[in-house]
Image: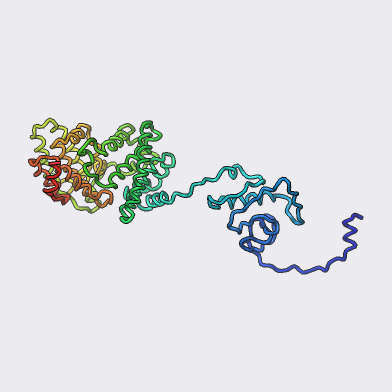
């Protein structure tokens, strides 16, 4: 007989015991499940894991895996220690816990085999909470200011996804979102304004760099970035001496932005630009059978008589820039018709492109822009008639104050002989002329 058989024959056979009842549970630790043994579910570490000196996944603390010294004697396996897959259990447990630990937690390198991903150094930077706050604000609230339905979904989902490939989009979106929070939380205005300025500086530089290599592959990102920059500038509020398309000294901040948007539209056209992530911008009807004021039940402005009078003034002025100003005035009248309608019945039947309030700005011809920058009187008066259109956008928080600022700027640069022609737009925006302020502007 074999030694095992001899030993078995010499030892008395134990009495057969009945199997103890136990409560089934699926809440044991992963190590016990792997070994297929009963886990006592003790926390912060079960007894089985403690007996075998391995890390139990019930313990929230990161494991301290000690590399054995070369002089230490090998540990003798105890009876019952699993002989297959033990390294896998220990390695996966330590890797999972280490990934969940804070960046400050450290551990000594393990001699056990690890995956290539586990061998890569963990990032040392913490989450950027302010940026996450801005992104949350953008995706839950700010995007609603830019459109509804399919357009709103585009700004909420497609635009951030576009930013994963082109970070300038994300920076400009976060800058706009920061200004929204600055508006909503006046007590923290300086904090959010600083965050907005930080992201705007980066986003504007990255957009400029990308614009140098304008192509079909990046035109969507450049266009969205340029539009977001425009909204950010509006959201910052009017700046002293800068009046959208002209300023007291030098070119306006808006001039390169408007040129950038117009350039992208002209180069690629809607057939290319309004596809892919921006497909929602071409999904709506191209023609409308009612003005915006009627569709949205908003107050209507009676504008036709004032425009007819101004058109006669420009045509009979004999100025060199009269023809240029008439073209600009006709373009502005088309936008008024799309927004407020025409005639006693406030009718409109035309392109939806004329129902975009700011369309007149980026469609403005270069010759008219030059007239504004030279502060030509007739061109400035035509620009003043854009103020009521801006005022009608004031339900949008980032448009507040711009209509009054623009007409005040025009009022400060035209001669008193033309002040009477500013009365109609002044009445529409409810802006009152302050003589003391005007005198300081003229003298300065």
Along the viewing direction, whichever of 207 and 351 lies nearer the viewer: 207
Give residue 386's quadrant in the image: top left
**Quarter that holds the C terminus:** top left
Q: Can residue 151 be seen in the rendering of this structure?
A: no
Task: Name the spot of residue 74 as percent of width and height, x first.
Answer: 75, 49
Along the viewing direction, whichever of 2 and 52 lies nearer the viewer: 52
Whether residue 334 is situated above or below residue 145 in the rendered picture: above
Name the residue rendered at 81%, 68% in the picture: 16
**Quarter that holds the N terminus:** bottom right
Q: What colour scheme was applied to this rendering of the protein?
A: rainbow
Q: Is residue 174 left or right of residue 292?
A: right
Whether residue 268 is situated above or below residue 141 in the rendered picture: above
Task: Name the spot of residue 254 as percent of width and height, x first.
Answer: 26, 39
Q: Is residue 94 left or right of residue 339?
A: right
Task: Name the spot of residue 237 as percent of width and height, x first.
Answer: 26, 47
Name the residue rendered at 70%, 59% in the picture: 51
Task: Name the spot of residue 402 as percent of width and height, x first.
Answer: 22, 47
Q: Is residue 412 left or right of residue 99?
A: left
Along the viewing direction, whichever of 437 and 233 lies nearer the viewer: 437
Name the residue rendered at 62%, 52% in the picture: 64
């Amino acid at each position: 007989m074999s030694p095992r058989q001899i030993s078995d024959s010499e030892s008395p056979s134990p009495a057969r015991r009945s199997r103890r009842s136990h409560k089934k549970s699926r809440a044991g630790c992963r190590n016990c499940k792997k070994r297929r043994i009963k886990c006592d579910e003790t926390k912060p570490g079960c007894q089985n894991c403690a007996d075998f000196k391995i890390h139990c996944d019930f313990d929230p603390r990161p494991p301290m895996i000690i590399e054995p010294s070369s002089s230490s004697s090998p540990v003798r396996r105890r009876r019952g220690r699993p002989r297959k897959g033990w390294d896998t259990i220990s390695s996966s447990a330590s890797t999972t816990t280490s990934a969940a630990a804070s960046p400050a937690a450290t551990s000594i390198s393990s001699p056990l085999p690890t995956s290539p991903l586990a061998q890569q150094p963990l990032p040392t930077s913490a989450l950027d909470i302010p940026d996450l706050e801005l992104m949350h604000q953008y995706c839950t609230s700010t995007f609603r200011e830019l459109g509804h339905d399919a357009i709103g979904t585009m700004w909420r989902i497609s635009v951030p996804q576009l930013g994963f490939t082109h970070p300038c989009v994300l920076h400009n979106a976060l800058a706009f979102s920061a200004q929204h929070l600055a508006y909503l939380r006046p007590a923290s205005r300086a904090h959010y304004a600083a965050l907005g300025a930080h992201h705007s500086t980066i986003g504007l530089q990255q957009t400029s760099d990308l614009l140098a290599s304008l192509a079909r592959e990046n035109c969507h990102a450049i266009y969205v970035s340029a539009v977001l920059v425009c909204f950010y500038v509006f959201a910052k509020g009017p700046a002293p001496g800068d009046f959208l398309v002209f300023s007291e000294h030098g070119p306006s901040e808006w001039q390169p932005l408007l040129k950038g948007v117009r350039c992208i539209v002209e180069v690629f056209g809607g057939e290319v630009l309004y596809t892919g992530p921006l497909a929602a911008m071409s999904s709506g009807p191209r023609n409308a059978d009612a003005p915006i004021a009627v569709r949205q039940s908003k107050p209507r402005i009676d504008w036709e008589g004032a425009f007819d009078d101004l058109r006669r003034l420009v045509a009979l002025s004999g100025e060199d820039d009269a023809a240029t100003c008439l073209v600009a005035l006709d373009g502005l009248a088309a936008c008024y018709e799309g927004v407020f309608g025409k005639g006693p019945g406030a009718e409109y039947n035309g392109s939806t492109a004329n129902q975009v309030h700011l369309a007149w700005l980026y469609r403005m011809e270069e010759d008219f822009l030059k007239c504004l920058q030279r502060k030509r009187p007739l061109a400035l008066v035509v620009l003043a008639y854009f103020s009521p259109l801006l005022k009608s956008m004031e339900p949008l928080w980032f448009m507040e104050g711009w209509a009054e600022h623009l007409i005040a700027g025009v009022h400060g640069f035209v001669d008193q002989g033309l002040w009477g022609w500013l009365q109609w737009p002044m009445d529409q925006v409810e802006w009152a002329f302050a003589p003391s302020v005007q005198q300081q502007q003229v003298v300065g």
